[in-house]
Image (cartoon, rainbow, N blue to C red):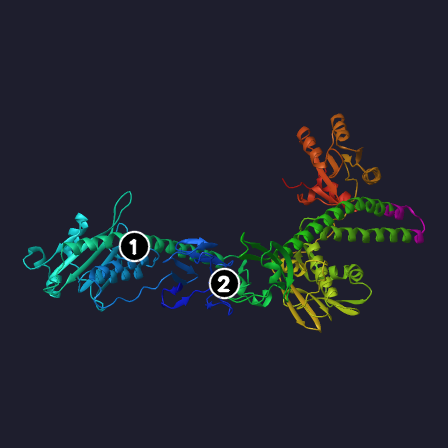
Amino acid sequence: MPALIQIDSQRRHELGERLTIGRGIENDVQLDDPMISRNHAEVVRQPDGGYQVRDLGSRRGTFVGARKIDAAALRDGDELLIGPLRLRYETTRLPPLAIGEPDELRKLRAVVELSRAIGVEHDLDRLLERVLETCFQLLRADRGMIIVYGPQSKTPCAMVARTRGGAPVEASLSTSVLSQVMATREPFLRTAIEGDRMLERSESLSAQGVRSLVAVPLLYEAAVTEWLGVIHLDSQAVNNVFVQRDLELLCAVAGQAALAIKNAMLVRRIQVVQNDEWQRLERVVKNLPVGVVVLDDQRSCLLVNEWVTARAGTIGEVRPHATIEHIADIPCDRIVGAELREQVTVGSPESTLILNAHTSGDGRETVIVISDITEERAQQAKAAHQDRLAMIGQLAGGIAHDFNNLLFIIVNYAGMLEESLPAAEARDDARMISQAASSATELVRQLLAFSRREAVKPKVIDVARLVVSMKKMLQRTVGPEVDLVVDVTAGGHYVLIDPSQLEQIVMNLVVNARDAITGHGRIVVRAGASDRHATIEVVDNGCGMYFTTKALGKGTGLGLATVHGIVQHVGGDITVASEVGRGTTFRIALPETDLAPEHTRELMTGPVARGRVLLVDDDDQLRRLTERMLRKAGYHVVPAANGPEALAAARCEPFDIVLTDMVMPGMSGRDLARELVAEHPQIRVVFMSGYHGASPLPDWQFIAKPFDRQVLLAKIGHVQPGGAQPPA
């Protein structure tokens, strides 16, 4: 009766109408192996009485011989490979040899069995064992040995050596015999060693008591004949010697064996390459900066890398050979067999993942690639926030420039009005207008500082005085729900720092404190001194700094990093004490400086104002006001509304000083100054602007808008002929 024989165990499975093979318990042949699918293959009887093997959509495939098949008719002796299971199809079962059966029939049956076996056997060690067993059946040998050499090598890659009874023996092939077979590629026969001078000298043969031997080369006949190895048999019995007919029979076996050995070696080489490639792939997948999972059509995990297993708490537990239900909260029923790209947010703290699933053409495997884009999205949000800040800063800088021009007019006309009014009450009113405009000027300057439109200019600053000056601005920042207390314990402690940076330190800490307060709260800002350091403390009764205070879309939380950078830059120190639910205290310590504080230059008295001034500004009101202040001080002033007009005026009469706005339509103040100095090298240039961007000028050459008459005349008096010489 036809049957499938398990080659390793020789277990026999009789065939009826249908036989199924798989991992599921419903199969006739059940094997619990991950390489075998739940329903892998079946063998079905055909109308003609033969049998056909069919693949049932398995993951690894079904093979007949070396061919991967979907369906194939079976022939007697065919070998099936299903995962690691090797089966042989037999239509008839040969009866055991009867006692007294003719010797020739026994040998013929041995050759037939060998032909059937080596046609499907690709394991080199098992193949050599089968060939040697056949040699013992065909010839009266006591011991046998088969040696196979690697390509272009004299080192054996496989060998089998044993006695007829199966006991292993040490390789004792005569070197002289092996050398002759290798050199001539011809078979070697010695019916009797006795009397053969070459063999009598062989210690290996004489030590083993060998009396007769035969050796044939294993030659693979192709375009070029390839020497694979040798079959060696010997006999120790006096009456059991090899003859020419034995040699011919062994040569016939060697011819068949050589082809099978060559195929087995090729299969082994392919397996080595496949294993190397698989190991290389595993190493690559293991070290990928993304997650990789491979599932079969039954949701069983075939491959998973460490990136995934290390995130089991976020993605879920994914183990090799396990049936997976979900990956990152996505049901595997949606993933397997699909082309999928999906973004999910999982875990706590939240992680944003992108899952890309791709299914092979036959639908048997689905590869899932998982990327964590949490940090990438955070960086994108941070970059977008920085871009928005830059745009706001640019807008604020432009608005502040125009606003400064208006304040300049208000401040100076209010000053002139104050000087011209006879009544004391009216002069007080004008003074209040001037003071209010000056406060607005300070607000604009702080706006420019926060928008990064002013260059860093370290100055000697009284810390306590600056904190007090910021109180109104800070109160508007924290809002009416928060009580702001400014506590200044000591003044007269000076540090060398850019005023806008010191204001930024205070503002960032106060804003951070405000964001930590929900509802009504209290913020205290203290300024003092300790151990040759001026100190600033900001204390709040909010939630504490260990919890984020930034709601979604409300900023990047970079304020403390900015404060830390400024404090480090000036050689200071920052400490923090925080308690969850009780509040936070930041303490800044800045080193005091021995430099003297700066004072406003007093107006020069007496008739010292002299010289000719070319005044250039595109704002009519500002230009008329500046001209009026200079004329009143005794200067000869020629006004110009733009660069070309100023160049024309300079060609008509000489000037000592050019006072020009930096930002004007058409020709800028810098371009104008460059052309004027080229034509008139002796001329002095002073710039005025609400800001001077990324190209700071020497202090003697720049007047920041808005300015009052005292500052203007001091600056012009500094550069006029006969005044203090500016640096070279």
Q: Quadrant of the N terminus?
A: bottom left
The residue indicated by pointer 1 is 261
Helix, strand, or loop for circle 2?
loop
> Where residue 116 appears, x then y in whole percent?
32, 57
Looking at the rendered structure, the kind of residue marked 1 is Ile
At label 2, counting other C-alpha atoms closer than 10 Å, the crowd grade (few under 14, some 14-19, many 20 or more) is many
Quadrant of the rendering where the C terminus is positioned: top right
Q: Which residue is mark 2?
A: 37
Residue 334 colored magenta?
Answer: no
Calculate the distance from the C-alpha at mark 2 to the C-alpha at mark 1: 31 Å
Q: Is residue 224 left or right of residue 548?
A: left
Between 582 and 518, the one nearer to me in the picture = 518
Residue appearing at x 74%, y 29% in the figure = 647
Q: Nearer the viewer, residue 575 or 135?
A: 135
Q: Is residue 422 magenta?
A: yes
Can you name the residue that lies furthest to the left here?
Answer: 195
Q: Considering only order in the chain, which callout, 1 or 2, is on the residue closer to the N terminus? A: 2
Mark 1 secondary-structure assignment: helix
Q: Is residue 176 visible?
A: no
Which quadrant of the structure image shows residue 350? bottom right
- Residue 333, image x and y in percent? 61, 62
Left or right of residue 5, residue 515 in this image = right
Question: Horizontal placement of 574 versus 199: left or right?
Answer: right
Give the residue type that dot 2 points to.
Ser
- The quadrant holding residue 334 is bottom right
- Please state the extent of the stretch shown in magenta in the rendering: 414-426
**Placement of 22 over or under 278, stated as above or below:** below
Residue at the location (85% across, 51% down)?
Answer: 434
Residue 134 placement (x, y as % from top left): 25, 61
The kind of secondary structure the magenta stretch mainly shows is: helix
